[in-house]
Image: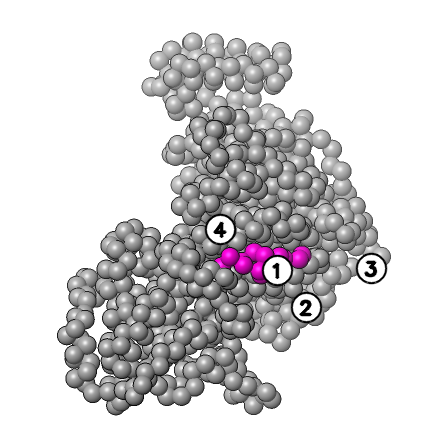
Amino acid sequence: MVAMMSLVPGEGVPRRLGDDPQADSDPGETAEWLDALDSTLQHCGPQRARFLLEQLQAHARELGLEQGVQAFSAYRNTLSVEQQGAYPGDLELEERITSLLRWNALAMVVRANHAYGDLGGHIASYASAAEIFEVGFQHFFRGESGAEQRSADLVFFQPHSAPGIYARAFLEGRLSEEQLARYRQEVAGNGLCSYPHPWLMPDFWQFPTGSMGIGPLNAIYQARFMRYLHNRQLLDTGARHVWGVFGDGEMDEPESIAGLTLAAREQLDNLTFVVNCNLQRLDGPVRGNGQIIQELEALFRGAGWNVIKVLWGSEWDALFARDSEHVLLRQLAATPDGQFQNLGAKDGTYNLEHFFNQQPALQKLVEHMSSEEINALKRGGHDFRKLYAAFAAARACKGRPSVILAKTKKGYGMSAAGESRMTAHQAKKLDVQALLAFRDRFHLPLSDSQVEQLQFYRPAEDSAELRYLRERRAALGGPLPARRSDVRPIAVPALEAMGGFALQADGKEMSTTMAAVRMLSAWLKAPELGPRVVPIVADEARTFGMASLFRQIGIYSPQGQCYEPEDAGSLLSYKEARDGQLLEEGITEAGAISSWVAAATSYAVHGEPMLPVYIYYSMFGFQRVGDLIWAAADQRARGLLLGATAGRTTLGGEGLQHQDGSSLVMASMVPNCRAWEPCFAGELAVILEYAARRMLSEQRDEFHYVAVMNENYPQPSLPAQVHEEVLRGMYRYVEQRVAAAQGRVRLLGSGAILREVIAASELLARDWQIASEVFSVTSFSELAREARDMDRASRLGQDGAGVSHLQRCLQGSEPVIAASDYVRAWPQLIAEYVQAPYVTLGTDGFGRSDTRQQLRRFFEVDRFSIVLASLHSLVRQGSVERQVLDQALERYGHGSRAAPWYN
Ligand SMILES: Cc1ncc(C[n+]2csc(CCOP(=O)(O)OP(=O)(O)O)c2C)c(N)n1
């Protein structure tokens, strides 16, 4: 990646004598060098000129002179007119089709907002991207042919351009007029969702891109995963391509650029980004005082991408051809984007005055042009020919990914209602005059009254437009976007085969992380499932005891291994291989989760169900990359997330940034995520087998988050009769009977804290004559989910509402005390459904470094605190005297919460 440089407009312009006298101490010598280059170019052609420059650059680098060399080119199209080639389509027809799309997209948004006022929607973004999309749709984006094997390209659509994509599907006959009229009105059914969403339109949208930055990152990892499938010989993905159309403002998101070097490193020439550089974002210019295109060029080039700039339309060709002294180029390079936006909003007269007539030489260059002709000078991103050439060059590029930087105008065609205006992004209501002007500008076959009524327009079935549209799509395979989910079920190994060791653990000591890795190994050996398991780590394999997998299944690397690993002789040596199965992502949780998403959506995208298992520090999951996980949920991901070193107090020593007390609560908020916190390895086995079976054999669109701990303790065997209850969220682990008990409580424990709860039940019986039942809670969220559903059914008077598992387990009025290694909000998920007095203990606050014992004491989730909470509940209930609690307090003492955040 290039060092951040200041991109002052004006840099990157070919310098000529006298440009900057202070910097040029010997203009004569400079002229000689430049003339030499000119002469090579003239006599030997661009290839030779480029070769010489490369040699010069390499030599300069050897001499230590490379600093300050600009990583971007002049402010003009990358491809020359000569390189452009002929346009293979019917330009006039494509323009007419695009105009219709523009109209229908606009009408959809304006109708929704005239009728309902606050439904929102965007016009200006698609208006700027219409030609980009059309070149893709008419000539490049391969659709799904419907054959058994998936063949379509993967296209990531700029989310707020959705109306344009709907408009196209309408012309193609895939969406009805009624559906268009129900844009953003989904609740009653048959509506169109605001942004791409595979739950809301499951046969249409593949990739949810509504949250800026996720699309670019996910696109890279989808392209990478296609190579992974290919190199592992699971699927031939050689013909498929990933296209991503993104906003220039969107490129500011750290996620947008997080995967750029990976894409280049892995030579993903199956990937093309098209950045719609309309120079604006929501509030204003992306780089008012700079040039976003130049900045992006430097960024992508530095990362190793092939960069193709499409800045100027064909109308400019003649001007550039005559610009032998580069005056035009220099003026363009010296114009900041804020000024380009301003010029874009104004007419030809203004542009003449404020741009061209600023310099005599430039004025001379355009002296033959009228202000109308100046007005008609288009930006490259609205020129089919220029775009086509760029798309073709990107598709043909080998060995690296490509990015097309297409300069466009936001709100193109909206005139005073939004074209290049500050407020363009939020323009959603156009008055009649603006609508009529739009109609005239794009020569739409609509009467005044049709315009006023915002009627959608679809040409006759046998019109030239629709025939062309159908022919082009047929030539490219079929409709797009389209999501398929037909896939064959995959058998998963029987519970006993993968988890027998844990079910009959018989007191053997191990952590649930160790158990999980052993179960993963068993899966990897299963005949049908084995090759489909995709273990993913973000530089923590050794932390979780997975180093043996390096050698066993290999680390995926498209280059194989070009070095002798330092530990070559060892049994666990570090092995990279082209067909390696483990994805070792390095320190990028955002990248690792994107790999997980690619594998977790493979069933739909490729028709190849996979089982991605991403294991990571639980603190660096939902908290760190929560929005990426949310997007995974949106796209119906199926896979396993293992939050390791889970819990606030099970990770002794590490301290506050590593200790996780919240991920389970966040997981519980994701609708199709099932979150688990098992204490014992046997429970874990039951959960993992269930998860794999549901996702792979039963084809359910859900994913599972399982917290696993690094604390070693004796693991009991798990009787078969409780397996089902483990999956419902809780089961009775033990009952402490006490003869002539003073009181009785129910104790709930989850994760590692269950063991404190068990110890508390023993203390309660031995020292205080309190009987108890101990429940192992494997998932507070699953308990809450069922209880909530039953509650609703009961409220609505539905038949057979029944009683939830939670309520069946906790009948009666004796107090219930729940303790968890997570914040109280986790056990409180069930509070509403517990009829008896309910008390929760949890680890709210910041973590800190110490032993597990000290930490549990500090957070008051240790056995003594549980005893105190139990006695207190009984005192409150009136079944135990206050002095008993006082005695207990005296015996156990209590922690001091001196932490500043409690003040
Ligand atoms: C993570 C995130 N932050 C903010 C938004 C709100 N938002 C939607 S579009 C937009 C501006 C997009 O600008 P750009 O990427 O340049 O696209 P354009 O519409 O200009 O083509 C913003 C801020 C969002 N969708 N996602």
Q: Distance between the residues labelled 1 and 2?
A: 46 Å
Label at residue 494? 1
Q: Quadrant of residue 739?
A: bottom left
Q: Is the residue under label 3 in contact with that under label 1 (CB below 8 Å)?
A: no
Label at residue 461? 3
Task: Please say if 27 is above or below 877.
Answer: above
**Quadrant, the C terminus:** bottom left
Q: Which of marks 4 and 2 is in front?
A: 4
Q: Is mark 1 on a helix, strand or loop?
A: loop
Label at residue 179? 2
Q: Distance between the residues labelled 4 and 1?
A: 17 Å
Label at residue 517? 4
Label at residue 86? none
Q: Is the residue under label 3 in contact with that under label 2 (CB below 8 Å)?
A: no
Q: What element carries label 3?
A: loop
Q: Earlier in the sequence, mark 4 or mark 2?
A: 2
Task: Please say if 542 is above or below 559.
Answer: below
Q: Which of marks 3 and 4 is nearer the N terminus?
A: 3
Amino acid at the residue labelled 2: Gln
Q: How far apart are marks 2 and 3 (CA)?
A: 19 Å
* Most common secondary structure along the magenta stretch: helix
Q: What element carries label 4?
A: helix
Task: Please say if 411 is above or below 569.
Answer: below
Amino acid at the residue labelled 4: Val
* Along the line of sight, the residue nearer the viewer: 128 or 744: 744
**Quadrant, the N terminus:** top left
